[in-house]
Image (cartoon, helix red, strand yellow):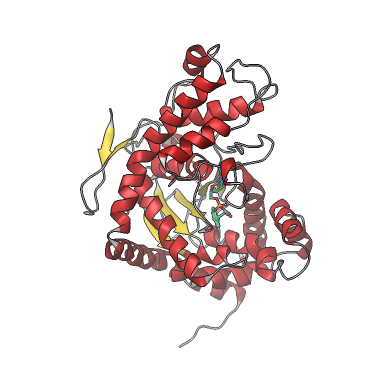
Amino acid sequence: MRGIVFRGGVGVPVRVRTHFLDFPRADVTLRRHTPMDYSYGAAAALPQGRRRTGGHAAVRVFSGVQPTGNLHIGNYLGAIARFVRLQGQAECLFCVVDLHALTVPRQPAALCADTLGVAALYLACGIDPARAIVFVQSHVAEHAELAWLLGCVTGFGELRRMTQFKDKSARAGEGEGVNLGLFAYPVLMAADILLYRSTAVPVGDDQRQHLELTRDLAERFNARFGECFPLPEPLIGETGARIMSLQNPGEKMSKSTEDPMSRIDLLDTPDAVAAKCRRAVTDSGREVRYDREAKPAVSNLLEIFTLVSGEPVAALEARYGDRGYGAFKAGLAEAVNEALAPIQARYRDLEAAPDHLAEVLAGGAGRARSLACPVMADVRRRVGLTAAR
Ligand code: TYM
């Protein structure tokens, strides 16, 4: 078993299986030679961005996760596992975007706990604060300030067109549930990214439209106020970017779906994972075969299986093809549990050491601020805000 030993000084070192994380050194190409090849990730494939003044890194990666409920395996495969692979290849900032989580009503204590929970999961999944800046969005006040300025170059119609806003506001109803924050959410997201002059943003497929808006806003700002921001490239994997619900392969796996059987949470017990895999919907017939059109449910399970186990889809099809869905689902549950066990062990260690996590986040916020402050000073000057003396 290949693996890495976490550094960071908390508890007993935990060995984490990394064949699916592919923790590369900076000089290692990330190509996986499976039918579901991770399509991006090689340092060479990272966009170069624009030349920057002030000696900034050529490639700067930014991404964030909202602290809204437990993270699931879609968040992991579509985003966090890919963050882990990027650290060391480029300057990376990984943020817990707590201000975004306020766009839906939250209990203050739950928000606070979820924020620390996501930060702990970042580390438990393998993000190394020595190689990436890990921080909480609200600890860097400039995010909200830049969001205001970008909001002043954003059209009302642009925001109305955002599909996530349409979906979420339809779910919340037109009453009190829909607030200005939810409407302006994509502007804050653009600010998160542009504040660091980020050039690459690893996200799942559902964030594609938000990234397009970010690029539009950067372009518009540059046109009005001079070249200020590079246009960030979305890094969306060919696989894992849209893990679907276990109960409905036509819907993406989501934290906000009420039915817990629809998703595998990263902190689920082995029994819960086994039950969820067992109860996952399947397609007609009994053959285990990858075919997105004809067999969307089984293909989704195969995608999860290959990504967590590192085994090529063809090998899984050969092993389970005619053994029926029962054996396939049992194998899937085992593979998922094997992948989650070290993450959960590390998470428990971090839970037992809250001071360590607080230190990591304080350090991350300091480093993030030192990058954000000069950009914000430049932005203020460009738009004509007077400097405080
Ligand atoms: P959030 O918190 O909903 O999701 C975190 C990341 O997980 C990805 N993801 C998925 N990937 C594959 N399959 C799924 N079923 C699945 N569900 C979620 C998301 O695409 C995301 O990458 N708006 C963002 C948070 C954010 C952000 C940012 C991201 C705020 N500011 C700046 C990047 C850069 C969101 O709601 O992610």
Residue 307 on image: x %, y %: 47, 30
Tell me residue 247's x, y (percent).
Answer: 63, 37
Question: Percent x, y for residue 255?
Answer: 57, 50
On screen, residue 144 versus residue 18, left or right, reads right
Q: Is residue 127 visible?
A: no
- Eyeballing the image, is 238 above or below 212? above
User: Residue at the location (67% across, 64% down)?
Assistant: 182
Residue 136 appears in view? yes
Residue in the picture at 70% in, 24% down: 293
Query: Image check: 150 left or right of 85?
Result: right
Front residue (pair 358, 162) = 358
Point 36% across, 46% down: residue: 344
> What is the quadrant of residue 350 in the picture?
bottom left
Camera-side residue of 204 and 252: 252
Number of numbered discs: 0
Name the residue: 55% across, 29% down: 301
Q: Quadrant of the C terminus?
A: bottom left
Please state which of residues 270 and 293 is positioned toward the viewer in this rendering. Answer: 270
Q: Is residue 322 left or right of 220 when viewed as pictured?
A: left
- Compared to 56, does 300 lie above or below? above
* Above or below, comparing residue 3 to residue 120 in the picture: above
